[in-house]
Image (cartoon, rainbow, N blue to C red):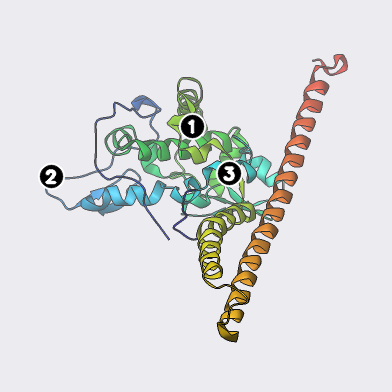
């Protein structure tokens, strides 16, 4: 089992800063870019990124890794289907209908994670909307490319109507208020085609194979795996070794008898703890399956109503 090394929702970059020739391209044409090029005079230690953010040229790679990586979620990606459904990202107007408050976060691993009536959304970085910068800085290494594509793709789902576009502007999710609805639809229409139809799903980081994630379930999965991998096996092996070296009934005195009893009790306590966590996980799984069944039932009912003769236009 993959050992979890960070806490549930620090920073731990999993991106290799070495650059290699991958042949990858931005998921949009240069003619459709929404942000102008940045500036970098030869010899100048400072670089102006698209969107007019200044940063030391030597820090650009590290900055991009920090801005885009979602390694904590990748550590539990085999379990994320219990925290959310595949490709399930509701547009912004739908989030409002559900009574959710859109909360801005700069941590990409919190992007599209929701709790109660709040959903965390990371503003779209300006550098993702410039062809030249994307081509030079984000197409290599491959994992960074997938991070960038995944975040871009999520916005094709969040903004699908002009009302979503207005909400995004009002919520300061877009890097410029000068972007028009027409330019947006052309740009993200191309991005959606490139990432959904012309290319396989692994052009996106595996976190973005899923949509919205429940915060409490993500944290539960994370802690459950930590309990199994970090606590259960080491503690169980340790107390078993102790118990095997102490034979009850032999004349070792009360201290050894107490040690043997404590070892057995400790092992039982760990087993009970894991059993309770597993039971809670089963409840989580059943709840998620029930929600999925209700979702498909509602979708099937809506499809049937749409094709009834009386509903024909």
User: Quick one: SS at disc 3?
Assistant: helix
For the point 61% across and 35% down, which residue is it? 86
Residue 58, image x, y percentages: 21, 51
Q: Residues within 10 Å of mark 3 (few under 14, many from 20)?
A: many
Q: Quadrant of the C terminus?
A: top right
The residue under label 3 is 80
Question: Is tag 1's residue or tag 3's residue first in the polypeptide sequence?
Answer: 3
Please tell me whether mark 2 sits on a helix, a strand or a loop: loop
In this view of the protein, which residue sits in the foreground, 285 or 273?
Answer: 273
Residue 82 visible to the viewer: yes
Query: Which residue sits at x=24%, y=34%?
Result: 20
The first of marks 2 and 3 along the sequence is 2
Q: Which mark is residue 313?
A: none
Q: Is residue 65 above or below residue 163?
A: below
Which numbered disc flags the more N-terminal residue, 2 or 1?
A: 2
Residue 301 location in percent, x, y?
Answer: 81, 27
Q: Nearer the viewer, residue 289 or 105?
A: 289
Distance between the Cα atoms at labels 2 and 1?
33 Å
Q: On the picture, is 293 further left or further right than 36?
A: right
Q: Quadrant of residue 133?
A: top left
Q: Which mark is residue 184?
A: 1
Rendered image: mark on residue 42: 2
Determine the image quadrant of residue 10.
Answer: bottom left
Examine the rendering and report whether any part of residue 8 can be seen: no
Residue 231 in the image: state x and y as whole percent: 54, 62
Q: Residues within 10 Å of mark 2 (few under 14, many from 20)?
A: few
Q: Nearer the viewer, residue 268 or 88?
A: 268
> Against 124, is 30 above or below?
above
Outermost residue on the left side: it is: 43
Check disc 1 and report its element: helix, strand or loop. Answer: helix
């Amino acid at each position: 089992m993959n050992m979890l090394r960070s806490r549930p929702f620090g920073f731990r970059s999993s991106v290799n800063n070495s650059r290699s020739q991958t042949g990858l391209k931005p998921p949009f044409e240069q003619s459709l870019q929404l942000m102008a090029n940045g500036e970098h005079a030869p010899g100048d230690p400072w670089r102006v990124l698209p969107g007019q953010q200044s940063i030391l040229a030597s820090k650009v790679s590290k900055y991009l890794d920090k801005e885009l990586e979602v390694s904590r979620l990748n550590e539990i990606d085999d379990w994320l289907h219990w925290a959310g459904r595949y490709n399930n990202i509701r547009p912004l107007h739908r989030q409002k209908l559900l009574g959710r408050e859109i909360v801005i976060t700069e941590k990409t691993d919190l992007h599209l994670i929701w709790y109660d009536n709040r959903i965390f959304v990371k503003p779209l970085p300006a550098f993702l909307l410039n062809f030249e910068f994307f081509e030079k800085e984000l197409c290599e290494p491959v994992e960074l490319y997938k991070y960038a594509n995944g975040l871009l793709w999520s916005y094709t789902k969040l903004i699908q109507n002009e009302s979503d576009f207005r909400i995004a502007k009002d919520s300061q999710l877009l890097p410029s208020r000068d972007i028009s609805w027409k330019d947006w639809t052309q740009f993200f229409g191309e991005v959606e085609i490139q990432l959904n139809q012309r290319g396989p799903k692994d052009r996106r980081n595996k976190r973005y194979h899923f949509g919205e994630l429940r915060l409490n379930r993500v944290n539960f999965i994370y802690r459950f795996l930590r309990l199994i991998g970090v606590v259960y096996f080491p503690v169980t092996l340790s107390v078993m070794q102790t118990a095997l070296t102490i034979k009850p009934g032999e004349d070792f005195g009360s201290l050894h008898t107490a040690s043997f009893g404590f070892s057995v009790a400790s092992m039982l306590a760990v087993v009970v703890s894991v059993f309770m966590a597993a039971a809670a996980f089963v409840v989580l799984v059943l709840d998620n399956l029930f929600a999925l069944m209700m979702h498909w039932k509602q979708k099937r009912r809506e499809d049937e109503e749409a094709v009834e003769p009386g509903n024909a236009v």
